[in-house]
Image: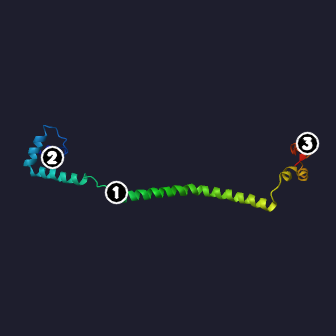
């Protein structure tokens, strides 16, 4: 094997990817050639620096940050939910207040006033001579 072929195979030698027949030849060449030995040593230094395992983050700090982030997300979800519910709730309360104010000002009408106000019905063009209605509104022979 010539010098260029050996230099091309040094990386495979370091990674353990050479075939069994080629390995002894590369090992003996590295022991005799200072340039190839320094190339192999430089590759070892680079691989240990680049491929060294990352140290885990400080777990207590990491957990604190994750929990704070989750709490922020929950707060945002709650805000998004209330952002559309509050206007509907306000509309419902305003409608209820309107109805209650109207009832307080005008008094609560009785069923008789609601159903039997013949004058208002006849003024509006309704036929109030319905005998069936009179029968329905009579309870045990007594008018309501």
Q: Which residue is drawn at 10% across and 47% down?
A: 30
Image position of 83 with respect to 126: above or below: below
* Whole-number angstrom distance, CA of label 1 to CA of label 2: 44 Å
Which residue is at 25% across, 53% downward?
A: 50
* Disc 1 packing (10 Å; few <14; some 14–19; many ≥20): few
Task: Give the numbered dot on residue 7.
Answer: 2
The secondary structure type at the circle numbered 3 is helix
Tell me the residue that label 3 is attached to: 131
Q: In this view, does 91 lie to the left or right of 78?
A: right
Q: Residue furthest front?
A: 140
Lower position in the chain sequence, tag 1 or tag 2: 2
Tell me the residue at 55%/56% (across/down).
Answer: 80
Disc nearer the start of the sequence (3/2): 2
Per the image, label 2 sits on a secondary structure element best described as helix
Rounded to the nearest angstrom, the CA distance separating label 3 from label 2 is 115 Å
Which sits earlier in the primary sequence, circle 1 or circle 3?
1
Horizontal and vertical percent for residue 126? Answer: 89, 47
Q: Are there few (<14), some (14-19), or many (20+) residues within 10 Å of tag 2?
A: some
Q: Do the residues labelled 1 and 2 touch (CB within 8 Å)?
A: no
Q: Percent from the top left, x then y, of residue 109?
A: 82, 55
Q: Is residue 1 visible?
A: no
Instruction: Point out residue 98 in the picture as x, y percentages from the top left corner.
Output: 73, 59
Residue placed under numbered mark 1 in the picture: 59
Please tell me the numbered disc located at residue 107. none
Residue 91: x %, y % from top left: 67, 57
């Amino acid at each position: 094997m010539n010098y260029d072929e050996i230099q091309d195979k040094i990386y495979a030698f370091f990674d353990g990817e050479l075939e069994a027949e080629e390995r002894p030849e590369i090992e003996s060449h590295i022991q005799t050639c200072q340039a190839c030995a320094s190339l192999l040593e430089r590759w070892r230094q680079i691989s240990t620096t680049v491929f060294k395992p990352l140290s885990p983050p400080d777990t207590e700090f990491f957990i604190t940050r994750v929990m704070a982030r989750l709490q922020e997300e929950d707060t945002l979800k709650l805000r998004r939910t209330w952002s559309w519910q509050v206007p509907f709730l306000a509309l419902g309360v305003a409608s209820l207040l309107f109805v209650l104010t109207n009832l307080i000002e005008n008094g609560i009408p009785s069923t008789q006033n609601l159903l039997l106000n013949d004058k208002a019905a006849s003024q509006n063009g309704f036929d109030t001579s319905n005998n069936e209605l009179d029968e329905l509104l009579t309870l045990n022979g007594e008018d309501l």
